[in-house]
Amino acid sequence: MDQPIGTYRCPDCGQPLEVMKACGATSYFCNHCNELKSSQRVREHNAAGNQEQH
């Protein structure tokens, strides 16, 4: 199940990511690193972080 918008964290710096959706695609942008992040890395990093919190 997808996380609500605004809860994804950058896999590199841990800052909140900006989630952009267009034409069925989702992109993740980190304002701190000033770059797009790989969707797969973002999902894996955030899934691992959520499991550690529970």
Image (cartoon, grey):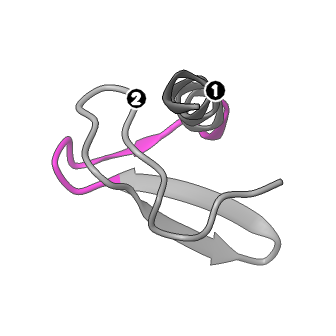
Question: In the structure shown, which secondary structural element does the residue marked by tag 2 occupy?
Answer: loop
Tell me if mark 2 has few (under 14), some (14-19) or many (20+) residues whose alpha carbon lies within 10 angstroms of its own. some
Q: Is residue 17 above or below residue 37?
A: below
Residue 43 vs 35, above or below: the answer is above
Q: State the mark number for residue 34.
A: none
Question: Which numbered dot is residue 11?
Answer: 2
Quick one: 31 or 49, which is closer to the camera? 49
Distance in Å between CA atoms under marks 2 and 1: 9 Å
Task: Kindly identify the amino acid type of the residue bearing the numbered disc 1.
Answer: Glu
The answer to which of 22 and 10 lies nearer the viewer is 10
* Image side of residue 19 versus residue 43, left or right: left
Q: Tell me where residue 50 appears, x and y as whole percent.
A: 57, 35
Where 45 falls versus 5 (above or below)? Answer: above
Q: Which residue is mark 1?
A: 44
Which image quadrant for residue 47? top right
Q: Bin the neighbour count of mark 1 within 10 Å (Cα to Cα): few under 14, some 14-19, many 20 and up.
A: few
Which circle's residue, 2 or 1, is located before the other in the chain? Answer: 2
Q: What's the residue at 59%, 31% (across, down)?
A: 54
Q: Residue furthest front?
A: 54
Q: Quadrant of the N terminus?
A: bottom right
45 and 23: which is toward the camera: 45
Q: Residue sitting at 57 percent across and 27 percent down?
A: 41
Q: Which residues are magenta?
A: 30-40
> What secondary structure is marked by label 1?
helix
Name the residue at 39% across, 55% down.
29
Kindly give the residue lying farthest to the left in the view shown.
Answer: 32
In the rendered structure, are the residues bearing label 2 and label 1 in contact, judged by CB atoms less than 8 Å apart? yes
Q: Is residue 30 left or right of residue 45?
A: left
Q: Dividing the picture into quarters, in which one does residue 31 lie?
A: bottom left
Q: Amino acid at mark 2?
A: Pro
